[in-house]
Amino acid sequence: MTDPQYIGRFAPSPSGELHFGSLIAALGSYLQARAHQGQWLVRIEDIDPPREVPGAAQTILRQLEHYGLRWDGEVMWQSQRHDAYREALAWLRKQDLSYYCTCTRSRIQQIGGFYDGHCRTLNHGPENAAMRLVQTHPVLSFEDRLRGRLIADENLAREDFIIHRRDGLFAYNLAVVVDDNQQGVTEIVRGADLIEPTVRQISLYQQFGWRVPDYVHLPLALNEQGNKLSKQNHAPALPAGDPRPVLIAALSFLNQPVISHWQDLSLEALLNEAVENWALAKVPLIMQTNTSFSNAAH
Ligand code: GLU
Ligand code: ZN
């Protein structure tokens, strides 16, 4: 399993503090990278200022440190990467692989929710328009290293999706691909909520002629109502006290071997043991209600 070329990452959006659900993604990607003796990078995805919470990015970095999750190299900030996104967009433009679209959300709703390529040949200018990719390489399925082959919704896979938003912001799918490629990420380990956009991201790699990374989508933590833990539904922030019981709960969520003597271990020793024990194949596929965490936190 040792692969010194391995590069993994954790890429949080600073729309709030880390909660138990985001710790699963952080810890799972960390363990997978360390078990390969590879690198683990952190990238702050601050490309959407309206959704940003002031101070959240620094809080996230402090939380990662508090939980002993040390990253390699410098943190990458998407807010510093606009030139790279512009360059990628200009390249697609030059290849005739993009076009401006002025369609409204309500028009797209009326035609069933997926875009029909209406503006492809209309030669709109940039005023008040989004930019879409000409989808010439739809990806209809992909191999998830944990879940096996995942089949995409065909409408989603074939859609000319947005790469530059009408409000001037760069689209997540564009930024994430440009950055993961720039950072040389070889495997993306993240939450199952990001399974859907994966085929779009792979199609972008193919358009650019870049090496497609491997993918692992971890199970999502649910709250007692069965909803995904998220900033939107007010998942509690990670406790600031002893990180060890929370890590133990996260390891148990990921169905990893029990570390029964954790109370005798330093944070560092606990994480080292978790790296040694790490078995991706044991990670459950389905979402779970996260009761162990409430026990650990209280
Ligand atoms: N920034 C995204 C999020 O917090 C994750 C991006 C990714 O892992 O691909 O949901
Ligand atoms: Zn249009």
Image (spheres, grey):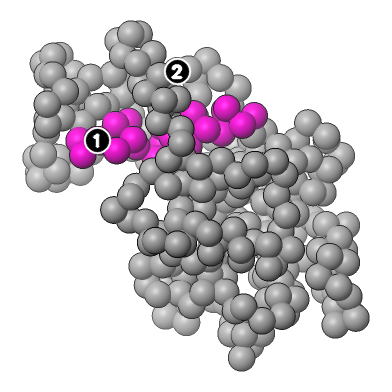
**Residue at 36% in and 67% down:** 232
Q: Which of the marked residues, 1 or 2, is nearer the chain's N terminus? A: 1
Residue at screen point 52% across, 15% down: 209
Q: How many residues crowd around disc 2 within 10 Å: few (fewer than 14), some, or many (20 or more)?
A: some
Q: Is residue 79 above or below residue 182?
A: below
Whether the magenta-drawn stretch holds residue 172 is answered as yes
- Residue 111 location, quadrant: top left
Is residue 177 among the parts visible in the rendering?
no
Q: Nearer the viewer, residue 126 or 109?
A: 126
Closest to the observer: 2 or 130? 130
Measuring 51% from the left and 74% from the top, which residue is drawn there? Answer: 237
Q: Residues within 10 Å of mark 1 (few under 14, many from 20)?
A: few
Task: Tell me the tag on residue 277.
Answer: none
The residue under label 1 is 168
- Compared to residue 162, the image places residue 242 above or below, namely below
The kind of residue on which mark 1 rests is Gly
69 on left or right of 80: right
The residue under label 2 is 207
Q: Is residue 10 left or right of residue 105?
A: right
Say what secondary structure mark 2 lies in: helix
Image spot of residue 243 (x, y percent): 70, 75
Q: Position of residue 127 (x, y in %)?
A: 12, 26
Residue 3, placed above or below residue 106 = above
Nearer mark to the viewer, of 1 and 2: 1
Quarter placement of the C terminus = bottom right
Residue 291 in picture, x, y percent from top left: 59, 82
Q: Are marks 1 and 2 in contact (CB under 8 Å)?
A: no
Look at the image and say whether residue 230 sits in the magenta stretch. no
Q: Say if residue 209 shows up in the picture.
A: yes
